[in-house]
Image (spheres, rainbow, N blue to C red):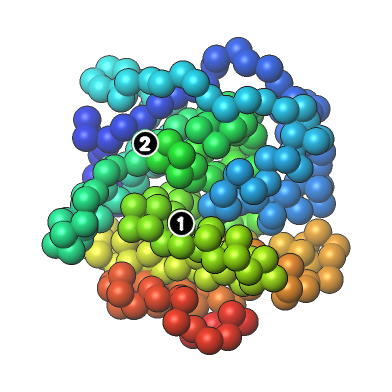
Amino acid sequence: MRLDDFDNSINVEDQRGGGGPRFGGPGGKIGCGSLVIALIGALVFGINPQQTLGVLQGMQGAAGPATRQEAPRQGADLAESCTVNTFSRESCNALASLNKTWEPLFRKAGIDFAAPKLVFYARDGQSGCGAAQSAMGPFYCPADQGIYIDTDFYTEMERQMQAGGDFARAYVMAHEYGHHIQNLVGTSDQVSEAQRRNPPMANRLSVKLELQADCYAGVWAARNKDKIEPGDIEEGLTAAHQIGDDTLMASAGRTPVEAAFTHGSSAQRMAWLRKGLETGNEDACDTFSVQSPAGTQ
């Protein structure tokens, strides 16, 4: 995907190289093999870390919420953070494109818009929602409106999930940005309240939230179709398939159980990403009007 270079309009925080505490084995990762895949399946692509940190902290040791606030990076500082590696540059480019795509849509709808910040960290960091750990995968924290990424995840994504490619990585950013949109318009709060009132529906509502973020990612791509290159769509759909709950459970040696899904099946994730791609219309992303959470339409 031929995205334009980032500019000073983006807000980036860089926690890499801070010398904080390290957990786990070599490289700061928790376990290996099926455990890593299971953790990625449970946590990656946007689940609220406040819902899962208790599990990770029980394995790794608790870490308190972040208190440090960093001013937006500009000029040389921003360029330094965004050019640490290719994945960093891609993430910054995607953030700039996402801001430029979604801000006019909010303005047209008469809804206040605030751009999120992109936070890079290495192995472990801090977010407004608590500890940030590499095993969590990329996530969005509504408390500080931050998209948190350890770019080493993209290497694991390619090697362990066979989901490589620049558009697959852009899909990750666009999905997390989708959660920011849900936060701004109040969808996330409504879902949290519904989950609190009806715990048996919690997983189904989570699936709907995640599938909507997939659809929003497709809308962004559709509105930037002039930047899309041959093979990009296939990369995105492959990534959506590989991070479906059923595929991840099977890869971890577990029998897929629909009642345990929190992000949606491979078929669902591909279908909603494709819907966003085909329509380019955020109004088409109403996953909550779908009667059957197991459906793909």
Q: Is residue 180 left or right of residue 269?
A: left
Residue at (22% x, 35% y) in the render:
9
Residue 27 is labelled as none
Residue under label 1? 189
What secondary structure is found at the residue carrying circle 2?
strand
Dividing the picture into quadrants, the one containing residue 155 is top right
Q: Residue furthest front?
A: 197
Residue under label 2? 117
Which one is in front, 232 or 88? Answer: 88
Badge 2 amino acid = Lys
Badge 1 amino acid = Asp
| Of callouts 2 and 1, the N-terminal one | 2
Residue at (63% x, 57% y) in the render:
162
Which one is in front, 78 or 281? Answer: 281
Work out whether 52 lies above or below 226.
above
Structural distance between the alpha carbons of marks 2 and 1? 20 Å
Q: Position of residue 103 (x, y in %)?
A: 21, 52
Task: Count neighbours of disc 2 (C-alpha within 10 A) and say few if under 14, some if 14 to 19, many if 20 or more.
Answer: many
Q: Decide if residue 233 is in sight here.
A: no
Q: Decide if residue 195 is in sight here.
A: yes
Q: Is residue 198 left or right of residue 281?
A: right
Work out whether 223 lies above or below 169.
below
Work out whether 151 lies above or below 205.
above
Dividing the picture into quadrants, the one containing residue 108 is bottom left
Q: Position of residue 92 (x, y in %)?
A: 35, 38
Q: Position of residue 210 (x, y in %)?
A: 52, 63
Residue at (64% x, 36% y) in the render:
134
Q: Position of residue 130 (x, y in %)?
A: 59, 33
Count of residue discs:
2
